[in-house]
Amino acid sequence: MDQHKVVYGPQEERQGYVGPFTLIQSTCVISSRYKSGSSVMKATDPYMALLAYRATPLQNGYSPAQLLMGRRLRTTVPTHPSELQPALPDCSSLFQKEREKRMSDATNFNRRHRAKPLSSLSPGQEVWITDTKTSGTVIQSHTSPRSYLVDAPLGVVRRNRLHLIPLQSPAQDEGGQQQQEPLPVLEQDHAPPALGFPVPSPGVSTPRNRSGRVIKQPTRLNL
């Protein structure tokens, strides 16, 4: 089936026939006029937008104009004259609302990001500094919140608790090994070892990783 392309002439367009090019051209003209009109409306009176922003109440119930000047501004919205009288905001209720808002924001942020409070560090504790990738010793806590003075190889530095990872000392590692060692069973001294589980030889320390967990060798490598 052949497809015929209909071409309208100037006389047919004057009689009411509209071609595709005419539709595209008219659409472009309308959109350009709308953009120019909206830009003119935005550029003619920007102070009305500032007035509406300054008169809009915040979450604490007061507008920026009330917090700055102690009174409401007259806008295009009809307002009773008694509402335009100067009146200072109640500072106690304002501070209470701001404090509650900050606590609510902090709670929501911690719940969303699963944030947890970190444990405090004691002087003389070995730590790993994440930004410099070196180890150091905690000297004392700093006056800033959650900050410590650390003796690093490059000198004494101040770091936040977030950038300090506690390291286990050898004494703590040995103490953990002594606590986790099983008690000897006298009745099964001559029992054969279970298949698939290597028996640790006496006098050999159990291998552990940096966090103190026991490193278990896979059974497939016990050939």
Image (cartoon, grey):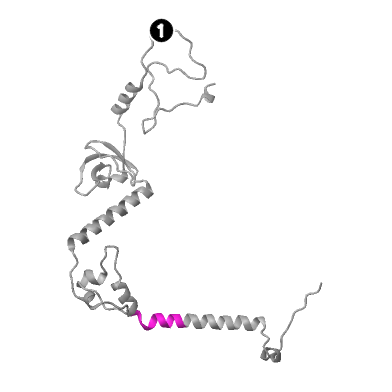
Going 39% across and 15% down the picture, which residue do you hit? 202
Give how far across and how far down residue 126 sits, in percent. Answer: 28, 36
* Magenta stretch contains residue 44: yes
Q: Is residue 104 above or below residue 180?
A: below
Question: Magenta segment range?
Answer: 37-46
Q: Is residue 185 above or below residue 109?
A: above
The answer to which of 202 and 47 lies nearer the viewer is 47
Q: Is residue 79 left or right of residue 88?
A: right
* Magenta stretch contains residue 133: no
Q: Is residue 42 above or below residue 110?
A: below
The answer to which of 102 and 139 lies nearer the viewer is 102
Category of crowding for the residue at label 1, using alpha-carbon neighbours closer than 10 angstroms: few (below 14), some (14–19), many (at least 20): few
Give how far across and how far down residue 25 sits, in percent. Answer: 60, 83
- Which of the image's four quarters has the C terminus? top right
Going 52% across and 81% down the picture, which residue do you hit? 32
Which image quadrant for residue 27? bottom right
Q: How many marks?
A: 1
- Which of the image's four quarters has the N terminus? bottom right
Give how far across and how far down residue 33 sits, in percent. Answer: 50, 83
User: Helix, strand or loop at disc 1?
Assistant: helix
Q: Is residue 145 above or below residue 182?
A: below
Q: Is residue 179 left or right of residue 199?
A: left
* Residue for badge 1: 187
Give how far across and how far down residue 107 sits, in percent. Answer: 31, 50
Going 54% across and 25% down the picture, which residue do you hit? 220
Going 28% across and 39% down the picture, which residue do you hit? 119
Which image quadrant for residue 62? bottom left
